[in-house]
Amino acid sequence: MPGSKIIFNGPDKTETDLKLAIENNSLIHIDHLDELYLIKELAVEMNKKPRVAIRVNMDTGVYPIWDRFGFNYENGQAWDAINKIMLNDKMELVGLHSHIGTFMLSPNAYGIAASKLSDLALGIKKKYKKNIQYLDLGGGFASKNTLKGSYLQGVDTSPTFDQYAEAISTAILNAGFVEDELPLLLLESGRSLIDEAGSLLGTVISNKRLSDGRRATIMDFGVNILFTSFWYDHKISPAQDFSQYTEDAVLYGPLCMNIDVIRENVTLPPLKRDDHVVVHTVGAYNMTQWMQFIAMRPAVVMIDMNEKAHVIRNRETLDSIESAEVMPEYLKKFKL
Amino acid sequence: MKFYRDSIVNSYAQIFFSNHKWLAYLLLLASFIDPYLGVSGLIAAAASVFFAKWMGFNQESIRSGMYSYNSILVGFTIGVFYKFSLPFFGILLLASLLTMLITVCLSAFVAAYRIPFLSLPFMLGVWAILLGARGFKAIELSERGIYAINDLYSFWGPDMAKFMQEMALLKFPLLIDVYLKSMGAIFFQYNLLTGILMALGLLIYSRIAFSLSVLGFLTGYYFVQFFQGNMTELEYSYIGFNYILSSVALGGFFMVPSLRSYLLVMVSAALIALSISALGNFFYVFQLPIYSLPFSIVVMLMIYALNNRYSMNGLHMVQYQQYSPEKNLYTYHNRLERFKNDTYFHIHLPFYGEWFVSQAHEAAITHKDDWRFAFDFVIADETQKTFKSPGEEVTDFYCYNLPVLSPAAGYVVTLVDGIVDNAIGEVNLGENWGNAIVIKHSDFLYSKITHIKEASFKVKLGDYVKKGEVLASCGNSGRSPEPHIHFQVQSTPFVGAKTLKYPISYYVSKQNEKYTFHSFDYPLEGQTIFRINTTTLLKNNFDFVPGMTMDFAVDRDGEKSNVKWEVFVDSANQSYIFCHETQSLAYFVNNETLHYFTDFKGDKKSLLYYFYLGAHKILLGYYYELEVKDVLPIDGFFTGFSKVIQDFVAPFGIYLKTEYSAKFIEIDDPMSPSKIRISSSALVKIGENVKRKIEFYFVLNHSKNFTMTINEGKICTHVIRIA
């Protein structure tokens, strides 16, 4: 991937990182003034004109406001940063970026964000005769997962892509851009694209009754593998024939820790040891946050369009952990 | 001084409707074979130019020789008729002034009828002098015409006289002899040498004019012979040149040379033969010569008549005079090939993004009869499906509710709203057009978009809308089984109006990830098409605004130089790049979508000419590997022997084919590019045999300091814009 096609975003960008980004003509989304000043210094030092955008936070009617990232729209910080870039002439302002939250269930919030960014872009055009080339509306689009505490299922409550598209494009088209100067729209739709593409296959270890009589089922995967079960009520279905009788149950993971709960309350047919289950919609945020606690991480398999399976990540072995470890010399002689 | 020199020299060339320097000097030389005539002609030319300048007539017209060429002919006549003496020069100056004044008046008078004045002022001037001089005894008739050799002897010496005598004894075939002498007769010199010099000048100036002169003369000659006319008159007096002048004028100067113009020349030659006889008999009564009167009358008659044709098909008038039959012809063909389909008013596609043409012109379903020139647009996926499953609701259709744009600027003159969207598969035959909008772009030019979503209009009746403005949303109202845009151009404001065949100005079609550029073309059924998105980097680099200067560092195989250009705009609002050093200019058009050159004048070895070739047509929106093709004017681009042959046969067919093509080859970053590379080539070929080929590479960047590399044969030239 050529560096010029990479957008470098986030609050933590080291000097080395920034140098690499500038060297490769990457797009840098500036998060705070200290970063802006550092890029300015590096631009002079490297005699290059970095391509930058600023991250803008704003009130979109959804709370909490993610105002810890970027420059605020309402209180003028965003214009302050824009002026600092435009008047200094050491950087080229090519885009504007916002990322208003996560798992946003209101498309209208994106409409508000799009019109506020468009307003900034048109203001820049008016004040500096400079066309902003893209608006990056960031991510936060909801997948079909069900958030914990939600009354209805995610499939029913999450907006469709069409609803998001309608809100964003209507706002931009009505903002008042000249036809030829309409900015490019970038979206960071990672979770909503990939979440439904991933499923986790697991096996029942055991059944037991809790002290209050509730049924408990222990699975061979827990929060170590399925990190997102902290905030989603994942849909789980049995993977073999089952009876018509169901019972409320608690689903536990295999860890020796009390927090290892996958579902606090799920209605499932009775499962027996070695039965298989499918956990749906696990494509996003799991493989980036899972851990090797007690159990090794499983293999990842991809099923392609022609229904052929390919292993794309091997099951971990002890070596996966040990290979990165270093034993101090004096401990090597220690005899058990 | 340069003004006087140019004006006088051009006067000579004007006699053959030219501004060719070589021809002018050869004619001047030829006129001095008889020195008395040479001197009188030159004095007449100089005097009229001086008088015209002094009286303050249009400088450009004077410089072109337009006001003075008739005076030269009058000068020759006076030189032939009267003896050199002091009164002679008096009458010569007076005649020049008179002829110039007649020319000015006549040119203003006939311009209203779109006809040229030709050599009518010459005839009027000559008659005025011949009739007038009869009353002045100081002006004596000359006998020189009778003893021509004596004059030559006394002026040029014995060698020349001997040479001329030997020339006179040369036995040319009769036809050639008469042709050459008739040619010389234009200058009142009935000898072979003058004729040869003039014919040579004509040949150098234009192959077409030369062949026309031969054709016209032969037709006239055989016509007179066949009808048993006065052959003596044709062979021994100042009359044969009427055929020559009229054929050059009609066949190649006022008309675009073609098979039909050649036929016209033959018909006119017959008419001239008739009018020579008619006018001769009439003016004999007054003892006045008719000289070039038949030519002037017949040509004026023809042009006035042809200008008043209802249909201009077949014989084409030259619209932009270039003072050369070849240039007129090649320019005509070049314009025809390049801009044949161009419309003055540009109509664009009425949507954003890639759409699919589900019905084009003259289609099987509904685009028939009076409504056959319409388009239906939908959005289709890679399997050509227009909806996502299950496709039972209008909202399942990809194009539903998407913005509909104004195809061009205009007023909203008709607006229908309030018709609900149909369920999928149903049609509303009662209100078949559904919700509709008609925009008036100009008189008799309207565009209509129908089947719009109810209550989605963003404009109202009477609004002025700009090109690309969002009008409404795509819907499914009217006779529409599934959401689509129906788009048509029409000449009336009514919703049910019949359609008008009108091309879409610029768009790109896409097939198998390959882009094709279309200009003034008609989208076809099954094509995936979109509007052209311009690229700022390209626009900036080809943004040549009047007053701007450009400096270039040129490295031609190690030989270094600097070139400076300036951009101007003329009174006709035509922009051009001017090179001060070579006095060359290249006319261009930038219409926000395309940059293209339209004309070049000046030094064909200059850098500007190479830029004119290399950047002949550049699309201002980047699409990977998209190729823009064009043709180049052959004149000046190729000068081999086959070009001479081509000139002769050009009216009947052009076998030297030119090709231009420009291709985008690289962009560093499609989103915010800082470097774009374009390769282009210009070539001329006969069949598949390439006779000349030049390759160009452009590297464009943000600072507008683009580089151009020119490769021709083994010679490589690097050009960098430095300011």
Image: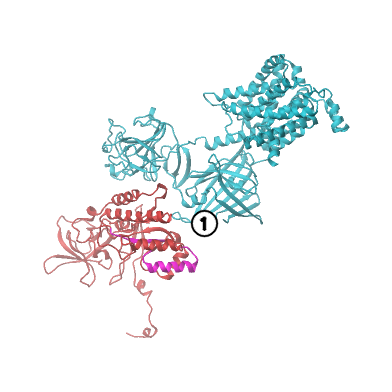
Chain colours: A red, B cyan
SS label for mark 1:
loop
A227 vs B26: above or below? below
The answer to whether residue A86 is left or right of residue B634 is left
The answer to whether residue B83 is left or right of residue B430 is right
**x and y, in percent, of residue B264 in the image:** 62, 23
The residue lying toward the viewer, choosing from A21 and B208, is B208
The magenta region covers A30-59
Locate residue B372: give its quadrant: top left
B525 vs B172: above or below? below
Q: Is residue B446 shown in magenta?
A: no
Which quarter of the image is occupied by the C terminus of chain A?
A: bottom left
Locate residue B234: give its quadrant: top right
Q: Chain of mark 1?
A: B
The answer to whether residue A145 is left or right of residue B150 is left
Locate residue B684: give its quadrant: top right
B666 vs A18: above or below? above
The answer to whether residue B207 is left or right of residue A205 is right
**x and y, in percent, of residue B483 in the image:** 31, 39
**x and y, in percent, of residue B506 in the image:** 46, 41
Q: Is residue A53 shown in magenta?
A: yes
Name the amino acid type tagged 1.
Answer: Ser
Q: Is residue A308 visible?
A: no
Q: Is residue A277 visible?
A: yes
Q: Which residue is mark 1?
A: B703
Residue pictured at 37% horizontal, 69% vertical: A12
The residue lying toward the viewer, choosing from B580 and B94, is B94
In the rendered image, the residue lying farthest to the left is A212
